[in-house]
Image: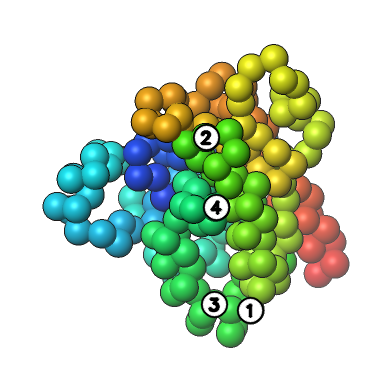
């Protein structure tokens, strides 16, 4: 069975919600999907002072376990147009995996969240692609076969680079139905491609 890791960092819970939708999508494509989170890098006192969501059930991930999966779908909020430092810190610890080529040929995909419609969602997703490529991973996005990302009838995230949600300036907006649908679609799409790659590799062997 194809194994998918949904690896996320979520300060306020929006990406956490999206992560479980991504995992749901992967499971709908007959994959085993595990949801884990990157460790927090700020102190508990500071996190509480800034109203971070502290009650997240997902277990903490470690870099050493990444090779156990066929696909890794990364979720992180946008910070000034780029990946949140907590997720970046997690990947800073993957140098040993890079040196050993442990992630070569695996699927890499990403999703994100920002406070505003133009708050850096695309730059965050595009900015993470080099990390996947340095590891020799195969990058998968959110294709336009998910037609929900093309309409303008409502405020919504989503781009060909990955699913996304808009939290609102005060963080009060939660992922919408169409944004969660995009997350599920991406999870299923990644899982399906990972399964095809796995079959092709098995045939070569």
Residues 142 and 118: in front is 118
* Residue ID for mark 3: 97
Identify the residue position indicated by label 1 in the image. Answer: 101
Give the x, y percent position of residue 203: 84, 61
Q: Is residue 79 above or below residue 134?
A: above
Vertical relation: 115 (above or below) 197: above
Q: Secondary structure at mark 3?
A: helix
Q: In this view of the protein, which residue sits in the foreground, 7 or 167?
A: 167
Point 28% across, 39% down: residue: 53
Q: Tell me whether the residue at label 4 lies in contact with that at label 2, contact meaning CB atoms closer than 8 angstroms.
A: no
Mark 3 to mark 1: distance in Å? 6 Å
Q: Which residue is mark 4?
A: 81
Whichever of callouts 2 and 3 sits on the residue coming sooner in the sequence is 3
Sequence order check, earlier mark of 4 and 2:
4
Q: CA distance from mark 2 to mark 3?
A: 35 Å
Q: For the view shown, which residue lies furthest in the top direction? A: 153
How far across and how far down the image is residue 112, in percent?
54, 44
The secondary element bearing badge 1 is classed as loop
Residue 160, given in percent of the width and then of the height, sits at 74, 41
Of residue 100 and residue 10, the one placed in the foreground of this image is 10
Neighbor class of circle 2 (other Cα within 10 Å; few <14, some 14-19, many 20+) is: some
Q: Categorize mark 1 by other alpha carbons within 10 Å: few (<14), some (14-19), many (20+).
A: some
The quadrant in which residue 102 appears is: bottom right
Pointer 3 local density, CA inside 10 Å: few below 14, some 14–19, many at least 20: some
| Residue 146 visible | yes
x and y, in percent, of residue 157 in the image = 61, 32
């Amino acid at each position: 069975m194809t194994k998918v890791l949904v690896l996320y960092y979520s300060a306020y819970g929006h990406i956490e919600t999206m992560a479980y939708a991504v995992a749901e999508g992967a499971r709908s494509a007959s994959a085993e999907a595990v949801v884990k989170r990157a460790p927090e890098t700020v102190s508990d006192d500071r996190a509480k002072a800034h109203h971070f969501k502290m009650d997240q059930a997902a277990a903490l991930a470690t870099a050493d376990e990444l090779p156990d999966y066929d696909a890794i779908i990364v979720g992180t909020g946008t910070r000034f147009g780029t990946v949140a430092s907590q997720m970046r810190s997690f990947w800073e610890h993957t140098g040993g995996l890079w040196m050993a080529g442990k992630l070569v040929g695996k699927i890499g995909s990403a999703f994100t969240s920002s406070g505003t419609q133009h708050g850096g969602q695309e730059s965050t997703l595009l900015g993470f692609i080099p990390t996947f490529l340095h590891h020799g991973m195969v990058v998968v996005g959110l294709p336009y076969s998910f037609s929900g990302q093309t309409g303008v009838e409502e405020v919504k995230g989503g781009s060909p680079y990955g699913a996304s949600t808009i939290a609102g300036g005060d963080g009060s907006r939660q992922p919408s139905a169409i944004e969660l649908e995009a997350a599920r679609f991406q999870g299923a799409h990644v899982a399906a491609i990972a399964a095809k790659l796995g079959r092709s590799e098995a045939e070569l062997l």
